[in-house]
Image (spheres, rainbow, N blue to C red):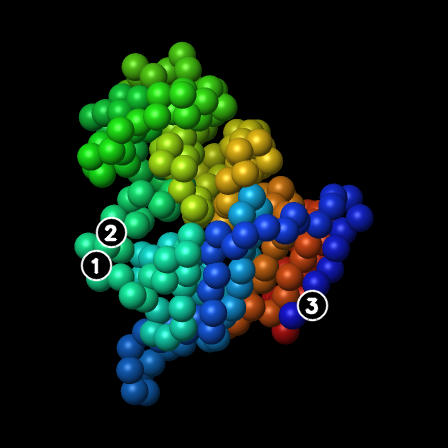
Amino acid sequence: MPRTTSPDRPAAPTGTAALALTALTKVHGSGESAVTALDGVSLTLERGTFTAVMGPSGSGKSTFLNCAAGLERPTSGTVVLGGADLSGLDENRLTALRRDRVGFVFQGYNLVPSLDVLRNVELPLLLGAGRADPAWRDEVVRRVGLTDRLGHMPSQLSGGQQQRVAIARALVTRPDVVFADEPTGALDSRTGKRVLALLRDVVDATGQTVLMVTHDPAAASVADRVVFLRDGRLVDELVAPTAEHVAERMTALGEW
């Protein structure tokens, strides 16, 4: 897989793997109607890195994210998250792992409308009968800029504020990986930039690992590297990307 490094930012740091995918395959259906969504994908995410996933429509981005996060089981191959092989877990243990060791940030926020900001942030801990680390919870809330909004309901927040609540909720359990699916898709460009800057800060300041699916070259340029999917295969990789390089690569993918 080709690797290109932009001179504008240093390459991603090295370290212990937070997520390792090996020969990952996902086939929907069977027989003549079978559709291969992922075809032998292998990828490693080191701790404290930010990786963006891009590709044309139908390239397998959503399936890739779902399998990596344990939301779907692959047809074959392995997913090792934080040292745990997901293929060896039954549904109950897989659910517990997603709750305790995975953070999710979606385009639609997915906040509970009847809970205030503080309870939404602490929800993974409440569901897991865990105890919040007050110091870490307060640090997360401060970092996302919501200290003065803890008693507000989601309906009282802007879209950007709701997405910041979702990011805080994703971080409160200190997950192995935060999975972000088009996190700026429902936001205006200015708010989207702020959310992306927050995700970048989360990686740089706390050593968190982020895997983000996006269609926006500007959003992808915030990451340490961008990997490109086409027809369910990883076909390219761009290290320390710029928006221009990402756009050029996406244009090339569309022409293949």
Question: Does the image show residue 14?
Answer: yes
Residue 118 position within the rendered picture, expressed as x and y whole percent measured from the top left? 31, 22
Which residue is label 3 attached to?
Answer: 2
Q: Earlier in the sequence, mark 2 or mark 3?
A: 3
- Horizontally, residue 60 falls left or right of residue 240, namely left
The answer, for residue 192, to whether it is visible in the render is no
**From this viewpoint, which residue is outermost toward the bottom?**
32
Q: Secondary structure at mark 2?
A: helix
> Dot 2 corresponds to which residue?
95
Q: Nearer the viewer, residue 81 or 4?
A: 81
Residue at the image point whose x is 40% and y is 73% from the top: 77
Residue 98 locus on image (x, y percent): 31, 49
Query: In the rendered structure, which amino acid carries the disc numbered 1?
Result: Glu
Label pair 1/2, CB-CB below 8 angstroms:
yes
Which of the two residues, 204 or 71, is positioned nearer the viewer here?
A: 204
Q: Residue 218 appears in which quarter of the rendering?
A: top right
Image coordinates for residue 178, horizontal then vertical, percent: 44, 44
| Quarter of the picture holding the N terminus | bottom right
Residue 196 or residue 137, whichever sits in front: 137
Inter-mark Cα distance, 1 to 3: 37 Å
Q: Secondary structure at mark 1?
A: helix
Residue at 24 percent across and 51 percent down: it is 95
Residue density around tag 1, few if under 14, some if 14–19, many if 20 or more, within 10 Å: few
Measured in 3D between alpha carbons, the distance from the residue under mark 2 to the one under mark 3, in whole angstroms, is: 36 Å
Q: Residue furthest right?
A: 7
Q: Residue at x 51, y 68 (%)?
A: 42
Q: Which residue is mark 1?
A: 91
